[in-house]
Image (cartoon, helix red, strand yellow):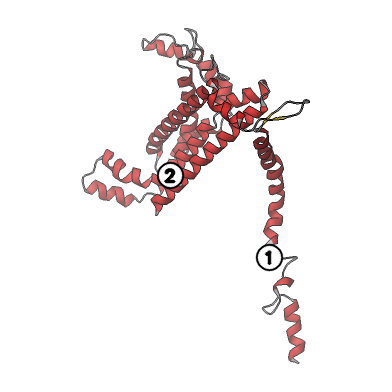
Amino acid sequence: MTLTTSRPRAAAGGPGASPRRRGPGRPGLLPWLFLAPALIIFLYFKYIPMTKGVWLSFFKVQPFLGDEWVGLDNYRQVFTDESFRAAIGHTLYLAVVQTGGAMLIGFCLALLLEGRARTLWFVRSAAFLPVVSAIAVVGEVWRLLYFPAADGMLNNVFGWFGIGPQGFLDDPDSALWWVSVVGIWKHAPYDMMIILAGLAGIDRQLYEQAALDGAGLRQRIRFVTLPALRPVVTILVTLACIRGLRIFTEVFVLTAGGPAGSTDVVMTRIYTLGFQSGDIGFASAASVLLFLGILTLTVCVTLYRRRKEI
């Protein structure tokens, strides 16, 4: 009698059932089946091209004539090419200026727009619009603002304050600065939203206690707000530096690297070498070095953050 009642429980997946009878295969296989389509797409469209790029960086690519093995010559050329070194300097300049400017303005905006009032959502949404706007449209608008004639939009505004007409993007000495202004304008709202999320997690009692101790606004920001935002700032610096090193669209739309290469950055230089000059091997080597630089920066910031958390 006991034998006839125990067999149906095992077959129905009860406590006595074997693990192999619960699913179509081993338990660890099912998640990989769900991930397989995405992994195949990533493998075909991302990782295989990346591997091919690394492989081509060791060749002088000659379509229809056969590729020629050159070893590390393409990598040496990256560091010896004067125009490429200038592009690296421009990239670092934009990364530092845009990161610092966007974080500073984003922090100020976050302090102004921080709160629980229902009407603030409209102002925050309006401030966030530059982030979701198409960069091609943004670039064309800023090109109109930067029109270098005396009757240009910004030159008219400068004229009200007695400032003479500016060359903006046509001036090799100041074009890089005006490009960085566009980047700061576009990325500051994104930093603002991240900082707002960090401000929401700060205990309000800390501000009240600091006020009771006689701390002013600046002291509360220095001793309460900034230390509490340290993890957020670390993440922002990482993201902003990566974004600054990979900058391409803004520069390409605004100046395409001109005038006279004064705004040429690493990504526009790679584009010019690979798709206009046809030097695929050199462009691949530069891309690999840029990837290694970003990877090194990310690892260093991650290790620094973990050490601080410990």
Which quadrant is the N terminus positioned in? Answer: bottom right
Q: Quadrant of residue 6?
A: bottom right
Give how far apart the Cα atoms at labels 2 and 1 are: 38 Å
Q: Amino acid at mark 1?
A: Pro
Q: Residues within 10 Å of mark 1 (few under 14, many from 20)?
A: few
Q: Which residue bears the numbered disc 2?
A: 232
Pinpoint residue 40: horizontal percent, then vertical percent: 72, 47
- The image shows residue 10, relative to residue 64, as above or below, that is below
Can residue 119 be seen at all in this image of the molecule? Answer: no
Pinpoint residue 150: horizontal percent, then vertical percent: 47, 7
* Front one among 181 and 59: 59
Residue at 41% x, 51% y is 307
* Front one among 90 and 101: 90
Q: Which residue bears the numbered disc 1?
A: 27
Which labelled disc corresponds to residue 280?
A: none
- Give the residue furthest to the bottom: 1
Q: Secondary structure at mark 2?
A: helix
* Of callouts 2 and 1, the N-terminal one: 1
Q: Is 11 situated left or right of 183 in this image?
A: right
Q: Amino acid at mark 2?
A: Val
Q: Is 85 situated left or right of 116 in this image?
A: right
